[in-house]
Image (cartoon, rainbow, N blue to C red):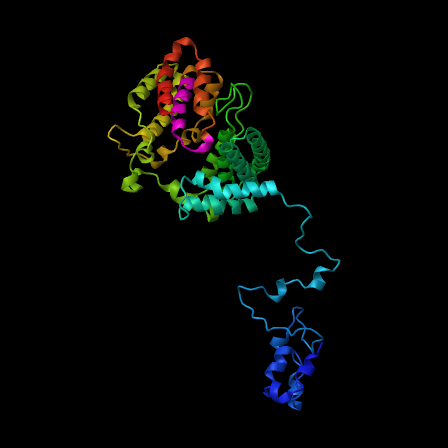
């Protein structure tokens, strides 16, 4: 190797002879042979170009290639965050360490499927500029990096989606098992968060509860007594229903600009569009006209159902009428009037809204196998069938109708005729 000082022996051709120091000598960290006495005294202070990663003034470099000048700006690594080989080989542990063999390919596959496939199905379109496509593909995984229960539940939804799309029975079983594993872990991590909700985690808890609902729908009925909002074969509510009540409390406790801040921002516009007048003219129609499914003549059947419910005992009738009026609004948002108009709240077009607003007293009537409550659930099955989301296609509508049919006495089964015909026509 040739020493740097040897490279500069030919002063006439190599050194630019600038005073007080040669620029090339300064750049490559060698002592300039043309330094004068006054330059020698001035050179005792470190030159900015001679600062090394250890922040020490550089003297003559030993053997090796010359160091290039470093350009420091806001977008490039600086000396402080570059670890030298000597530092990394020291006995002191580094700030970030990784275990050997810690890469989990199964989870990587789930995240990849979620961001590239499942997210678009949840957003309802494939337009990459749509704010909800952006949310499900980009924002939600980043929320999960901070709030791990969100990531766990996203894994679960992705696994259920893979199981839904795959025709191989063994693979279906494999991914449903994986989905149940992550859903259980995510729910376990989410529960204590709801007990200590604050402005920093309220948005994550809100979207996590939504993912739990998707998991519940994707899993399908767990037995003949499963009525979606309760299970007649157990003594407690469905695992996801308490979360719905918790989310309602979150909505009451936090303002929208707090709940839907940061990465949750896309939900701000969707949740604040309260009236049909705020919608574009082409969207002021019932869902059946916008999404292209068959319109049902629902007005008369629902009017007759309301008269039947109102004729029951006053205590039960009051509870059921309140829930039925909410369902009627969703029927209007879903199927509209006969002239295809829809002129009420935009939120009435969300079929899941009925579950979200359901009171515990109505769930109690279902547990008691109250005829009015059971018949209403069969009518809700018709609304469920209009949802095109893949996770709803787990047989819920047919299951609810058949389960209610088995629980009702013969005198009440006539009320199931319209829901049964409507489901048959929509298949």
| 317 to 295, vertically: above or below | above
Provide residue 396's location: percent of width, then percent of height: 46, 25
Q: Residue 359 appears in which quarter of the rendering?
A: top left
50 over 75 or under it: above or below: below
Q: Nearer the viewer, residue 394 or 267?
A: 394
Q: Please, is residue 73 above or below residue 374 in the view?
A: below
Which of these two is toward me, 369 or 150?
Answer: 150
- On-image quarter of the N terminus: bottom right
- Location of residue 171 (image quadrant): top right
Q: Position of residue 338 (x, y in %)?
A: 25, 28
Decide whether residue 350 is among the magenta residues.
no
Residue 356, placed above or below residue 86: above
Q: Residue furthest top?
A: 410
**What residue is at 39 percent from the left and 14 percent from the top?**
313
Farthest-out residue, right = 91
Looking at the picture, how far across and down is residue 207, in whole percent? Answer: 49, 39
Question: Residue 66: horizontal and vertical position, in percent?
Answer: 65, 74
What residue span does the magenta drawing correspond to? 373-391
Quadrant of the rendering where the C terminus is positioned: top left
Looking at the magenta stretch, what is its main secondary structure? helix
Q: How many marks?
A: 0
Instruction: Depth check: give the residue in front, 296 or 266.
Output: 296
Residue 267 visible here:
yes
Left or right: 386, with 64 as reference point: left
Tell me the quarter of the picture where residue 69 sits: bottom right
Instruction: Answer with left or right where residue 129 lies relative to residue 164.
Output: left
Q: Is residue 21 visible?
A: no
Report the side of 201 relative to 315 (left or right): right
The residue closer to the viewer here, 395 or 50, is: 395
- The verdict on residue 380 being magenta is yes
């Amino acid at each position: 190797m040739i020493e740097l000082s040897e490279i500069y022996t030919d002063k006439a051709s190599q050194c630019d002879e600038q005073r007080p120091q040669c620029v090339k000598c300064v750049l490559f960290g060698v002592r300039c042979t043309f330094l004068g006495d006054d330059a020698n005294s001035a050179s005792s202070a470190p030159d900015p170009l001679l600062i090394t990663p250890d922040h020490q003034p550089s003297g003559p470099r030993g053997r090796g290639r010359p160091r290039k000048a470093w350009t420091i700006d806001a977008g490039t690594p600086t000396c402080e965050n570059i670890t030298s080989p000597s530092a990394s080989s020291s006995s002191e542990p580094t700030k970030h360490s990784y275990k050997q063999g810690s890469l989990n390919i199964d989870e990587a596959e789930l995240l990849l499927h979620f961001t590239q496939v499942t997210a678009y199905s949840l957003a309802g379109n494939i337009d990459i500029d749509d704010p909800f496509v952006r949310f499900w593909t980009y924002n939600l995984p980043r929320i999960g990096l901070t709030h791990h229960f969100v990531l766990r539940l996203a894994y679960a939804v992705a696994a259920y989606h893979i199981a839904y799309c795959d025709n191989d029975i063994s693979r279906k079983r494999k991914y449903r098992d994986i989905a149940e594993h992550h859903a259980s872990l995510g729910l376990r991590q989410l529960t204590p968060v709801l007990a200590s909700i604050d402005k920093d985690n309220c948005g994550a808890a809100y979207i996590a509860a939504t993912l739990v609902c998707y998991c519940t729908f994707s899993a399908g009925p767990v037995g003949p007594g499963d009525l979606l909002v309760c299970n007649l074969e157990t003594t407690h509510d469905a695992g996801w229903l308490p979360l719905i009540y918790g989310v309602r409390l979150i909505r009451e406790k936090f303002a929208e600009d707090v709940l839907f801040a940061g990465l949750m921002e896309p939900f701000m516009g969707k949740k604040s569009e309260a009236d049909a007048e705020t919608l574009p003219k082409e969207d002021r129609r019932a869902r059946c006209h916008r999404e292209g499914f068959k319109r049902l003549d629902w007005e008369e059947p629902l009017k007759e159902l309301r008269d039947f419910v109102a004729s029951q005992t006053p205590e039960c009738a009051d509870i059921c009428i309140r829930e039925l009026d909410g369902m009627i609004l969703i029927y209007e948002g879903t199927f509209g009037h006969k002239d295809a108009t829809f002129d009420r709240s935009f939120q009435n077009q969300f079929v899941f809204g009925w579950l979200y607003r359901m009171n515990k007293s109505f769930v109690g009537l279902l547990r008691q196998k109250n005829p009015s409550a059971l018949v209403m659930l069969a009518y809700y099955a018709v609304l469920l069938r209009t949802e095109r989301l893949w996770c709803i296609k787990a047989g819920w509508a047919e299951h609810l109708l058949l389960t209610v049919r088995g629980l009702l006495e013969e005198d009440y089964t006539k009320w199931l005729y319209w829901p049964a015909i409507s489901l048959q026509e929509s298949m």
